[in-house]
Image: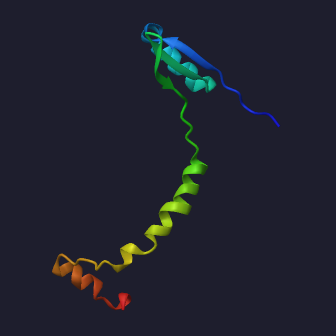
Amino acid sequence: MYTNVHMNYILPITDLRKNIFTVIDHVARNGDIVEVEREGKKIAKIVPLSDDAAERAEHLLTHVLPHLKGVWKDKPVKRNTAVEQQYWKRDIFS
Protein backbone atom coordinates (compact mmCIF):
# COMPACT_ATOMS: atom_id res chain seq x y z
CA MET A 1 0.00 0.00 0.00
CA TYR A 2 1.30 3.44 -0.93
CA THR A 3 0.83 6.58 1.09
CA ASN A 4 1.08 10.09 -0.21
CA VAL A 5 3.83 12.03 1.49
CA HIS A 6 3.73 15.76 0.92
CA MET A 7 6.59 18.09 1.59
CA ASN A 8 6.39 21.03 3.95
CA TYR A 9 8.12 24.11 2.65
CA ILE A 10 9.10 27.14 4.71
CA LEU A 11 9.02 30.34 2.69
CA PRO A 12 9.92 33.89 3.72
CA ILE A 13 7.06 36.34 3.31
CA THR A 14 8.99 38.41 0.75
CA ASP A 15 9.33 35.36 -1.52
CA LEU A 16 5.61 34.69 -1.13
CA ARG A 17 4.85 38.27 -2.16
CA LYS A 18 7.03 37.92 -5.26
CA ASN A 19 5.66 34.54 -6.35
CA ILE A 20 2.23 34.18 -4.77
CA PHE A 21 0.52 32.75 -7.85
CA THR A 22 3.34 30.29 -8.50
CA VAL A 23 3.22 29.13 -4.87
CA ILE A 24 -0.57 28.70 -4.96
CA ASP A 25 -0.37 26.73 -8.21
CA HIS A 26 2.34 24.51 -6.71
CA VAL A 27 0.22 23.80 -3.62
CA ALA A 28 -2.86 23.02 -5.72
CA ARG A 29 -0.95 20.79 -8.16
CA ASN A 30 1.30 18.84 -5.77
CA GLY A 31 -0.60 18.99 -2.50
CA ASP A 32 2.42 20.31 -0.61
CA ILE A 33 2.11 22.52 2.45
CA VAL A 34 3.82 25.91 2.46
CA GLU A 35 4.49 27.68 5.73
CA VAL A 36 5.11 31.42 5.58
CA GLU A 37 7.72 32.91 7.86
CA ARG A 38 8.22 36.51 8.97
CA GLU A 39 11.06 37.60 11.22
CA GLY A 40 11.82 33.97 12.04
CA LYS A 41 8.27 33.16 13.15
CA LYS A 42 5.74 31.11 11.23
CA ILE A 43 2.75 33.32 10.58
CA ALA A 44 0.68 31.43 8.01
CA LYS A 45 0.24 28.04 6.43
CA ILE A 46 -1.01 27.40 2.90
CA VAL A 47 -2.60 23.97 2.62
CA PRO A 48 -4.48 22.32 -0.24
CA LEU A 49 -8.22 21.92 0.15
CA SER A 50 -9.83 18.66 -0.79
CA ASP A 51 -13.28 18.87 -2.29
CA ASP A 52 -14.61 15.35 -2.47
CA ALA A 53 -18.20 15.08 -3.69
CA ALA A 54 -18.61 11.64 -2.10
CA GLU A 55 -17.66 12.98 1.33
CA ARG A 56 -20.10 15.89 0.99
CA ALA A 57 -22.90 13.53 -0.07
CA GLU A 58 -22.18 11.18 2.82
CA HIS A 59 -22.24 14.11 5.27
CA LEU A 60 -25.59 15.28 3.90
CA LEU A 61 -27.13 11.82 4.09
CA THR A 62 -25.93 11.05 7.60
CA HIS A 63 -26.09 14.44 9.36
CA VAL A 64 -28.34 16.88 7.51
CA LEU A 65 -31.21 14.91 6.00
CA PRO A 66 -32.23 13.05 9.19
CA HIS A 67 -32.97 16.41 10.79
CA LEU A 68 -35.06 17.61 7.84
CA LYS A 69 -37.34 14.59 7.46
CA GLY A 70 -40.72 16.01 6.65
CA VAL A 71 -40.47 19.36 8.43
CA TRP A 72 -41.95 21.14 5.42
CA LYS A 73 -45.04 18.88 5.34
CA ASP A 74 -46.49 20.35 8.53
CA LYS A 75 -46.63 23.89 7.19
CA PRO A 76 -49.98 24.91 5.67
CA VAL A 77 -49.98 25.91 2.03
CA LYS A 78 -50.89 29.55 1.50
CA ARG A 79 -53.55 30.21 -1.13
CA ASN A 80 -53.13 33.80 -2.23
CA THR A 81 -55.75 34.37 -4.91
CA ALA A 82 -59.29 33.21 -5.57
CA VAL A 83 -58.17 31.80 -8.93
CA GLU A 84 -55.55 29.67 -7.22
CA GLN A 85 -58.07 28.47 -4.62
CA GLN A 86 -60.49 27.43 -7.37
CA TYR A 87 -57.67 25.62 -9.17
CA TRP A 88 -56.93 23.44 -6.14
CA LYS A 89 -60.66 22.67 -5.56
CA ARG A 90 -60.95 20.78 -8.83
CA ASP A 91 -62.06 17.14 -8.74
CA ILE A 92 -58.72 15.74 -9.82
CA PHE A 93 -57.16 16.89 -6.54
CA SER A 94 -59.90 15.39 -4.34
- 21 or 90, nearer to the observer: 21
- The residue that appears at 52% across and 20% down in the rendered structure is 35
Seen at 61% across and 27% down, the residue is 31
Towards the viewer: 89 or 41: 41
In which quadrant is the C terminus drawn?
Answer: bottom left
Compared to residue 65, the image places residue 16 above or below, namely: above
Marks counted in the figure total: 0
Q: Residue at x 57, y 19 (%)?
A: 26
- Residue farthest along the front direction in this orientation: 40
State the image coordinates of residue 25 (x, y, percent, origin top left): 54, 20
Q: Quadrant of residue 52?
A: top right
Residue at x 42% of width, y 11% of height: 17
On screen, residue 8 above or below 76: above
Quadrant of the frame with the N terminus? top right
83 sits to left or right of 62: left
Q: Position of residue 84 (x, y in %)?
A: 23, 78
Displayed quadrant of residue 71: bottom left
- Position of residue 69 relative to residue 3, above or below, is below
Q: Nearer the viewer, residue 57 or 94?
A: 57
In this rendering, position of residue 9 left or right of residue 15: right
Looking at the image, is 22 positioned above or below residue 71?
Answer: above
Give the percent coordinates (x, y) of residue 67.
45, 68
Q: Report the residue that reaches farthest toward the right.
A: 1
**19 on left or right of 57:** left
Q: Position of residue 54 (x, y in %)?
A: 61, 50
